[in-house]
Image (tube, rainbow, N blue to C red):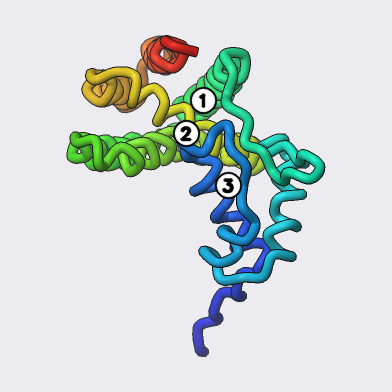
Amino acid sequence: MPATSKPAQSGRAKAYDYLKNTVLADPDAEGGFISEQEVAERVGVSRTPVREALLQLAAEELVQLVPNRGAYIAPLTGRDLRDLVELRGLLERFAAERVMAAGTVPWRAMQEVLEQQERCDDPASAKEFIELDAHFHTLLVEAAGNSMLSRTYTALRARQVRAGLVALRRSGTRHAEVIHEHQAIVTALANGEVEAALAAIDDHHAQTLKHQLTTT
């Protein structure tokens, strides 16, 4: 029986994916307006699906639609960063407790991602490093087996990547620190040490927020 191919993405879906995971994940885009024409040309669609994607992103509060100006990318405030870390902490702590109780800890997969991060040790690899960072944490959340939890966490991705890049840029030692903090999480998970795992997650988020707020 022939394999079924995946349906092609719609123009709106292509524009949405590009905007959310590329444009909105870039700290350099903060404080600027999005050019519908540039996005349309980059994605290879007309401006109509770009507008539709921007309406969806505005509903998700990822952009602000300003009359006669277009879609504005507001910088992440200190409050935004604190709220993001707090929500991530709640979701990740819950996931850690759930997978440890169920014996479904994805520590090997998380260790593999951590090893990939270790190789991204130059400024040119900053985006890849933070993308892997998001993947590292997503593995833990998805292992909890709660689809609504996973969707909620995935919705944080653009802000998570942007905020992670901010922290990385503001500290010359953040790469090594993240590796150390991630290793502490993986080690505790692999050893079945619940309290140590939760403490490692809390410490990781606290250190990340500290660097994000350095000049915020």
Q: Nearer the viewer, mark 1 or mark 2?
A: 2
Amino acid tagged 2: Pro
Depicted 204 relative to depicted 9: above or below: above
Badge 1 or badge 2: first in the primary sequence: 2
Lateral position of residue 26 relative to residue 193, left or right: right
| Callout 3 touching callout 1 (CB < 8 Å) | no
Placement of 145 over or under 43, stated as above or below: above
Residue 93 on image: x %, y %: 52, 20
- What type is the residue that disc 3 sits on? Lys
Is 179 situated above or below 65?
A: above
Q: Secondary structure at mark 3?
A: helix
Q: Which mark is residue 27?
A: 2
Whether the residues at callouts 1 and 2 have beta carbons within 8 Å, the answer is: no
Spatial CA distance of label 3 from label 1 is: 22 Å
Residue most extreme to the bottom: 1
SS of the residue at dot 2?
Answer: helix
User: Which class describes the residues within 10 Å of circle 3: few (<14), some (14-19), or many (20+)?
Assistant: many
Which residue is at a point 64% across and 61% down the rendered structure image? 13
Q: Is residue 27 above or below residue 92?
A: below
Residue 43 location, quadrant: bottom right
The amino acid marked with disc number 1 is Glu
Return the residue nearer the eye: 209 or 166: 166
Q: Which residue in the structure is indicated by mark 1?
A: 92
